Amino acid sequence: MITNPFAIFCVLTLVVLVSVHLEARYKLFKSFSAALVGILIAMVFSNTGLIPGNSRAYDVLIDPGISLGIVLILLEVNLKTIRQAGPVMLIAFGLGAVGTAAGAFVSALVLAPAVGPETWKLAGQFTGTYNGGGVNFAALGRAFDTSSDLFAAAIAADVLITAFWLMCCLAAPVVFARGRHIAPETGGGQAQLAQSLYSSKAPTTLADATLLVVVAVGTVWAARRVGTWIPLIPEVLWLTTITLIVAQIPRIKAIPGAALWGYYLLLLFLTTNGAQSVVKNIISVGPAVLYFAMGTVVIHGLFVFGLGWLLRLDPATLAVASQANVGGPASAMALATARGSTHLVLPGIAVGLVGYAIGNYTGFAVGMLARGALGF
């Protein structure tokens, strides 16, 4: 087993490198997305004993790496692009967000006896991750101070359910053949969103890089300082709010490479999650955590595809919106591309980035609501 932290970190970077190349070259892996491929490869490595399930190398990516990743990705969010996502995609995404919150809350009420006093924390974390991706899961887990065993088990369950749901969304447009075709909606802001995760919108200079580092590190520092001054509001909400405000400044918005590096940190973080996802942790904590993730996503699916079908929304749009909820913008883009729905790539990325922005808020709200309902 590899135990040296630098060697483990090297393995993680190699996994990300391989995942990105597989996504770029092969249709099958493109449908999975580099994020999911990296998670699964790292999960295999840790479960077969090549790398450990716990290491100091992982701590760097969890904090402060994940906070910097949140800032860099959110710097790409322009609130005006919400309108460019198109009303149908926004409606579908909204159905999914409500379904996720309802699913997490119901799962908490049903599974509280099996999960225990930290049930409300899972409700918040699964709401966050299935509204905006793994970044929110980690941020909320740190805010709630979730125990390491439960956190690791929840990550493993999340990986399994996310992979299962991706396959469901790939099949959904065929199963739900009814619905009207949604005309393509495009926009310059969306085109930038489509490219920003994989390439810099302009050549990066040393001056740009140094400014980007100052903004990212400074935002994380500011959020933590404000969090100490006003401890009633978790630091992650301050981080999200301050970043969204800073992101609207034209000079900062013009810095190239923010989302690219943010996405790279996200891929490293998700790969770390895979490495920490030792399946035996689910067994040690109990299958209730897996049922929790499954229940949340199933109810999410009922809202998206059930209500969407009744509203006669385009099945491909519903599938992409659901992936924007559950897997984030990269998964939404991968799904739209894999299904040949190229006109949905840009709207899917746009609402996926909206999910990054709202996931921490909705996760915190549902977590607190579940805590109150359960009396913990």
Image: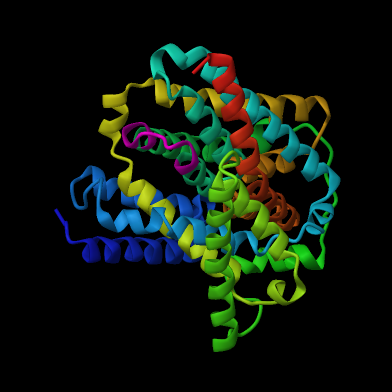
Query: Would residue 10 be found to the left or right of residue 185 on screen?
Result: left
Please give left or right for residue 184 compared with residue 281 in the image. Answer: right
Badge count: 0
Residue shown at 35% from the left, 59% from the top: 60
Q: Which region of the structure is painted magenta?
A: 142-151
Q: Residue at x 36, y 21 (%)?
A: 287
Quadrant assignment, res 80: bottom right
Give yes or no for residue 223 being in the magenta stretch: no
Q: Residue at x 69, y 73 (%)?
A: 252
Colour scheme used in the picture?
Answer: rainbow
> x and y percent of residue 304 in the render?
70, 31
User: Does residue 140 appear left or right of residue 154 in this picture?
Assistant: right
Q: Position of residue 146 (x, y in %)?
A: 41, 35
Comparing 16 with 309, the one in front is 16
Q: Quadrant of residue 299?
A: top right
Q: Is residue 128 above or below residue 209?
A: above
Q: Position of residue 228 (x, y in %)?
A: 53, 49
- What's the magenta bit mostly, secondary-structure-wise? helix
